[in-house]
Image (tube, rainbow, N blue to C red):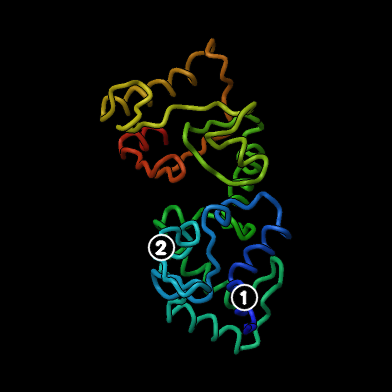
Amino acid sequence: MSVTEPAPVAPPPVHEGILRRQSLRESAARTYARSLPIVPVRARGLTIEGADGRRYLDCLSGAGTLALGHNHPVVLEAIRKVIDSGAPLHVLDLATPVKDAFTTELFATLPPEFAENARIQFCGPAGTDAVEAAFKLVRAATGREGLLTFTGAYHGMTAGALEASGGARDVKVTRLPFPQDYRCPFGVGGERGAALAARWTESLLDDPGSGVPLPAGMLVEPVQGEGGVIPAPDSWLRRMR
């Protein structure tokens, strides 16, 4: 009679432990992580390498923030230059040479007439913060409270930004039709659908009996992302302006 030892059980891959701990430690507010069980360890350009050894084509691009891809050498060099210089990395709203250079270059990209009267505000790290700042600005400037937004929109995860997004319920904003061909709100699509959408908006604002008071502002995406990657027609955007 011979006795053999059982074969050792291989430990689970490292990335599985990381994902398990994430699900235990972080709130259920996580969205992308639930549908993308990936543990990124390296990234370059368009691709991400996971801890499982697989390579992924990154179509999310940091929700649009990585216009130059991951770890672009020019970006890395600029970051190293600032870090090596010993410049302060957190100074609230104080002016620094790096901030001044950035603002100067940004204003140089604007039309001269616009740049002459433009003012810049440095918001928080996410687009949501910029949206919330815009809400405060238009309400302070107009003395009004209402907002105009569009079906299919997405503007952020804070309470105010979610209220202005397309899927929110019990909203305090007026939801307007966004022109598109695939699911045209008027069933016609094309230029005719865009013209009807613009006319609908004009009617709501011009008709004192529409029940829509004059708003503080309008929040519009030239290209809807969450709504299905829908570009707005140029003529319609000009009429909204």
* Residue 84 relative to residue 188: left or right: right
Marks 1 and 2 in Cβ contact (< 8 Å) = no
Q: Residue at x 53, y 13 (%)?
A: 208
Provide the residue designation for mark 2: 109
Q: Image quarter for residue 94? A: bottom right
Q: Foreground residue, 42 or 188? A: 42
Q: Image quarter for residue 199? A: top left
Q: Tell me, yes or no, if residue 219 can be seen here.
A: yes
Q: Foreground residue, 85 or 73? A: 73
Which residue, as the protein is rendered here, is positioned at the far bottom?
84
Q: Secondary structure at mark 2?
A: loop
Q: Foreground residue, 234 or 118? A: 234
Q: Amino acid at mark 2?
A: Thr
Q: Secondary structure at mark 1?
A: loop
Q: Position of residue 136 (x, y in %)?
A: 66, 42
For the C terminus, the quadrant is top left
Q: Amino acid at mark 1?
A: Val
Q: Is residue 210 above or below residue 150?
A: above
Q: Residue at x 31, y 25 (%)?
A: 193
Q: Position of residue 32 (x, y in %)?
A: 55, 54
Q: Position of residue 195 (x, y in %)?
A: 31, 25
Of mark 1 and mark 2, the one earlier in the sequence is: 1
Front of the two marks 1 and 2 = 1
For the N terminus, the quadrant is bottom right
- Around disc 2, counting alpha carbons within 10 Å, would you say few (fewer than 14), some (14 to 19), or many (20 or more)? few
Q: Tell me, yes or no, if residue 70 can be seen here.
A: no
Q: Image quarter for residue 217? A: top right
* Residue 23 relative to residue 32: left or right: right
Q: Which mark is residue 9?
A: 1
Q: Position of residue 212 (x, y in %)?
A: 56, 19
